[in-house]
Image: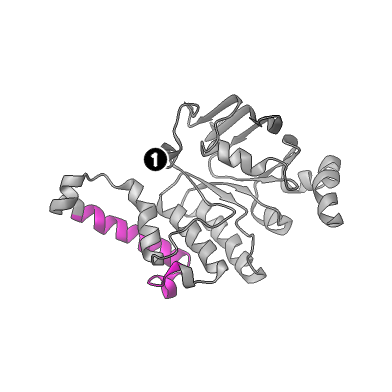
Amino acid sequence: MTQPLLRAQQISRQFGGLLAVDDVSFDVTPGEVLTLIGPNGAGKSTVFNVISRIYPQTSGHLEYRGKDLGGVAPHQIALLGIARTFQNIELFEHATVLSNLLIGHHIRSRTNLLSDLLFLPSTHRQEIAAREHVEKVIDFLSLQKVRDSMVAGLPYGVRKVVELGRALCMQPELLLLDEPSSGLNPEETDDLVYWIRDIVTEMGVTVMMVEHDMSLVLRVSSRVVAMNQGRVIAVGTPQKVQSHPEVISAYLGSESAS
């Protein structure tokens, strides 16, 4: 039996008197796309923030590859092999696309200040390796035309792709995508479908996603976890969860009513 890559057991997160995440449990299996769905305020992004250690859980147990994440600082998460994107794009807008991607890869650097200042052979080798990896990501996401462009001057959809690229440059084992299709047009969303599939099958990266676009969810997800008011209400295949009465009421019903 395959061991989970990520395991959340009875995770809760409280903000004052508000219980944003309430007794949530799930496993993420290597090689799958696990998607969290639910109406606004269901607690999905809070779950991502707990995994990223932006917020520690109030109670419960969270582990990655069998390692307890309870004492792990936010800046250490990427080193463990977890990368993420955000609902609101977080890029260096006055730097080029290439520079942003190289910054993403920097966490894999094994040089020190002295070797960098002297530009020793080890630093030179690592710089070449970083460039090679970043260029592969640029080719993968078809960013060649904008590689030397300033991020601030790019359309929103392209910036979303750059943020995805920066996360991939961190060479993660687990990629957290927070509403990746938000703000994308149908053509860009179609591209995203193929990229997510290839990220899993060609790069060997496991994906966990928060998403509202049910068309995208149905096309790429292996399993779905539906949440409402901080709690898990259904887990299963996209088709099974989509037809679950509580999901129809809490998520699909609220969407059609809005």
Residue 140 belongs to magenta span: yes
The residue drawn where x is 31% and y is 60% is: 132
Q: In which quarter of the image is residue 218?
A: bottom right
Q: Nearer the viewer, residue 21 or 184?
A: 21
- Residue 176 position, x and y percent, is 55, 47
Q: Residue furthest front?
A: 16
The count of marks equals 1
The correct choice, above or below, for 37 with respect to 180 in the image is: above
Question: Which contiguous range is marked in magenta?
Answer: 124-151
Q: Which of 70 and 14 is in front in this view?
A: 14
Label 1: state its secondary structure. Answer: helix
Could you tell whether 229 is left or right of 96 in the image? right
The correct choice, above or below, for 142 with respect to 227 in the image is: below
- Residue 223 position, x and y percent, is 67, 44
- Residue 71 position, x and y percent, is 46, 26
- Residue 64 position, x and y percent, is 50, 32
Residue 8 visible at all: yes
Q: Which of 205 and 225 is in front in this view?
A: 225
Q: Mark 1 is on which residue type?
A: Leu
Question: How many residues crowd mark 1 within 10 Å: few (<14), some (14–19), many (20+)?
Answer: some
Residue 152 belongs to magenta span: no
Main SS, magenta region, reads: helix
Q: Name the residue under label 1.
A: 79
The residue drawn where x is 51% and y is 65% is: 159
The residue drawn where x is 49% and y is 29% is: 69
Q: In which quarter of the image is the N terminus?
A: top right
Q: Quadrant of residue 76?
A: top left
Could you tell whether 78 is left or right of 193 in the image? left
The correct choice, above or below, for 182 with respect to 27 in the image is: below
Q: In which quarter of the image is the C terminus?
A: bottom right
Residue 120 visible at all: no
